[in-house]
Amino acid sequence: MSGIKKIPRKVGKWLQDLVHHKTPIRRNRVRTSLTKPELQQRAARCYAMAGWPDDACRMFEDLGDDHHAGPYHEQQGRWEDAAMCYARAEEWQNAARCYLECQKPDDAAKSLLKAHQVLQAAWVWADHAGQFVRAEATLQQFIPQTETDQLSVNLILARCGAVPAHQMQAAQRLHRTIEQLVTLPPDFQRQRLHNWALRVADALNRPDLITSLHAVGVRADLPAAHEQWERWSFDIWGDATGIPDRS
């Protein structure tokens, strides 16, 4: 354990013994009123401070403390373990994020539904899982309350329609949505919808609509919109000719 120098040797030995379920030697027979779970909680905190994330994680799992174990799995890139911890702790949005990281979109969408995030669940089923029928069925549970909600529904339906038999209708739906994005308040919802719209345009293989969306992003002053446009243009065309200069 490389972090052992960060804490006193005796404490490190005690922690190691506790990990391996050994009873630490009580040289002075000091009495303690702490229960084993309380000692394990202390040990877990010591591991965390000492920079031993795997041991801290294992200790929290032994305690059944999935709320604290999940982030340690996440830090180490153990996405499925993290997702399962978050799910057991009923932290559904965290679970969904981790399920997406480990390529389990169906579980991610189910977690989002449990978090009452119907639109996000439908989007994941459509864009990440390719389960268009299920995405459309999920939208039937949702009644749009705001313009942002309606635009979200339109984009999900456009993503479901980005298949050869329905591409024309999907492109028309996306085109109607593009100019409306500029009128939205400058918050994370507008950024999310812009990203969704780019995914739809890409699925439709419509560089003209992608160009329009990048222009809308610059007009709406979205973060890094100009750089994103330039990067896409270089990737597709090999240069950024025609992109307006930064004002």
Image (cartoon, rainbow, N blue to C red):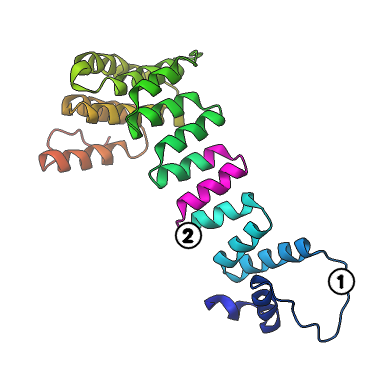
Q: Secondary structure at mark 1?
A: loop
Mark toward the start of the polypeptide (1 vs 2): 1
**Looking at numbered disc 1 in the image, what kind of residue is underneath it?**
Thr
Q: Does the magenta-highlighted stretch encompass residue 110?
A: no
Task: Determine whether, in the image, residue 232 is placed left or right of residue 26.
Answer: left
Q: Position of residue 132 (x, y in %)?
A: 34, 23
Q: Quadrant of residue 195?
A: top left
Q: Secondary structure at mark 2?
A: loop
Tell me if mark 2 has few (under 14), some (14-19) or many (20+) residues whose alpha carbon lies within 10 angstroms of its own: few
Depth check, front residue: 179 or 106: 106
Give coordinates of residue 56: x percent, y percent. Answer: 61, 64
Disc 1/disc 2 C-alpha distance (Å): 34 Å
Read off the magenta span.
77-94
In terms of image quadrants, where is residue 55? bottom right
Residue 187 seen: no
Q: Badge 1 is on which residue?
A: 32
Residue 61's place in the image compared with 173, above or below, is below
141 left or right of 212 in image: right
Within-10-Å neighbours for mark 1: few <14, some 14–19, many 20+: few
The quadrant of the rendering that contains the C terminus is top left
Label for residue 76?
A: 2
